[in-house]
Amino acid sequence: MSRPLPSNMRLLIAGSLGFILCGAINPLYGLAIPIYRAEWGAGWGGTLLAFHGAGALLAVAAGVFGLPHLTMRLSLGLLAAGSVITALGTGWPVVTLGAFVIGIGFGLTSAVVNRRFLSEFGERGPGMVGLVNSVFGVGAIAAPLILVGLGERLLPVYLGLAVMAAILIPVVQPSGRQARAQGLPDLRQKRLAILIFIHLAVITEVALFGLGPTSLLDMGLDSGAVAGLTSAFFGAFLAARLSLFWVTRRIRADQLFALGLGGAAVAMGIAAAGAPATGFILAGAAVGLQFPTFYVWASHILGPDPRMGSAVLTASISGAITGPALLAPVLAATGTGALFAILCGLMAATLAGFLLMSPWARRHALPA
């Protein structure tokens, strides 16, 4: 008779595979929207992405309110349900509803997995947060390849996501450390001001993901070179996050976050100064360090309350939503070729603010 898997091993398997599924979602949207437009006409692509973002924001906001029963099994069930709705969708309204449900599952998975990996793996927790966030990139790389390999047929891809999510539901065990606190926490506490740093970091990350290749094209690189550089960017991003499994044992999370901010500023400066290929690849490694290390550091400052972990995710996801809206008018005036110079200034200012505020934050950290 086989022995059951230990709870932590079940968490590792379900969390890692769940993050691979989450990593696949955004690249699939990018490839699916042109297919939907060809079949149903233009007009809903932006709405689909907005509904996904709204669902993710709703999920992490629910965590801030301390709502009960926000578990990993629920998040996987929502990912499965949303994928089925999207797979079987026969028009823009249905696939947009599917994207909204997927978004809720996406946000809840991010909140629950990061919190449980940090709290349930003991001293290895910070490294495990970096590790699980690194496999997110595996999904982002694999999903487009699988879609192309299946002849750009969305139905089997989304049904495959649904089946994988459903299979993982019985694998993961409920947490033995469920928080008792419920209701909205005190949002007047000054230490919450640290969330501005991850908000700004995610604005930069999303801008590089979505606009970096366009900026490279506007700076004169040909499409073949840009495709290769985009792959190298994500390779560097993935390598940086994998490295956190070992590096976090030797270097504090706040120091690594500062390194990520400073590295991004330097990389963007290199890109803006005439070496866009080198700068863009280096930026992939720099931004790869940022979210996992900030999450670990913020947990020390804001305390172990799961609602605070959800607050970090709320600041992060809101940055992904507001960033494009804030950058659009600026880039309309300057051209996307100025993106790297703009992000260089933003990261330099964010680093300066973080270095000034982090000593104060450490002095006012809540006890674990």
Image (cartoon, rainbow, N blue to C red):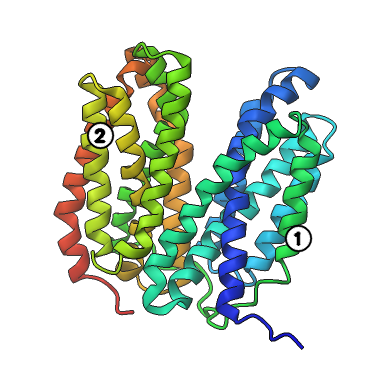
Element at label 1: helix
Establish if 357 lies above or below 342.
Answer: below
Q: Residue at x 57, y 83 (%)?
A: 176
Horizontal side of 125 relative to 257 (left or right) equals: right
The residue at which mark 2 appears reads as 267
Horizontal side of 353 relative to 232 (left or right) equals: left
The residue at which mark 1 appears reads as 166
> Who is closer to the viewer here, 266 or 4?
4
> Who is closer to the viewer here, 318 or 72?
72
Q: Horizontal and vertical percent for residue 136?
A: 52, 50
Q: CA distance from mark 2 to mark 1?
A: 41 Å
Q: Quadrant of residue 52?
A: top right
Establish if 256 lies above or below 100.
Answer: below
Within 10 Å of disc 1 (Cα), the crowding (few <14, some 14-19, many 20+) is some
Q: Residue at x 49, y 38 (%)?
A: 321
Q: Residue at x 72, y 49 (%)?
A: 161
Q: Horizontal and vertical percent for residue 106?
A: 60, 52
Decide if residue 32 is in sight here: yes
